[in-house]
Image (tube, helix red, strand yellow):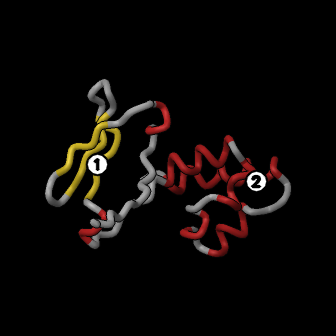
Amino acid sequence: MKKEMSRTIDIPKGYNYGQLHLVLYWNRFKVVSPNGELLYEDERPYMLKKRNIPWKSILLDWARKRRCVTYSRYASYLPGRIYQYISIENYQLRKERIKWLKPVSDP
């Protein structure tokens, strides 16, 4: 019996659609909405290439849902000082600090 490996890849804006279409190439893939809009394009995970983290959309989500910062899977990728800076207990101050980080994340 063939055992298949499954990996989860976060698709920004993917939660807006019930179904997504994958276009697979030998070295990369595309995620397309049912309307034909290109949502995501990247190298295949097994190609051993580094992946960019969509910090802009993550910080937008964290600004809306301030309590999820400490539970987010992306929190471990933050430098220690920045994580300490935004993981304080005061949620209003946390929201302001996340908003201060958003311009830094823009290229």
Q: Quadrant of residue 85?
A: bottom right
Q: How many marks?
A: 2
Q: Label 2 sits on what residue type?
A: Arg
Q: Label 1 sits on what residue type?
A: Glu
Residue 91 placed where, x, y %? 81, 50
Q: Nearer the viewer, residue 102 or 5?
A: 5
Give the vertical position of 64 relative to 105 (above or below). above
Label 1 packing within 10 angstroms: few (<14), some (14-19), many (20+): some
Q: Nearer the viewer, residue 26 or 53?
A: 26
- Say which element carries label 1: strand
The C terminus lies in quadrant: bottom left
Q: Nearer the viewer, residue 42 or 93?
A: 42
Residue 47 placed where, x, y %? 24, 69
Give the vertical position of 31 relative to 5 (above or below). above
Q: List the residue tagged with mark 1.
A: 41
Image position of 98 (left or right of 89) = left
Q: Earlier in the sequence, mark 2 or mark 1?
A: 1
Image position of 8 (left or right of 88) = left
Question: For the point 44% across and 31% down, which residue is it?
Answer: 18
Tell me the number on the disc at residue 94. 2
Q: Nearer the viewer, mark 2 or mark 1?
A: 1
Q: CA distance from mark 2 to mark 1?
A: 32 Å
Tell me the number on the disc at residue 96. none
Question: For the point 17% across and 60% down, which residue is it?
Answer: 27
Label 2 packing within 10 angstroms: few (<14), some (14-19), many (20+): many
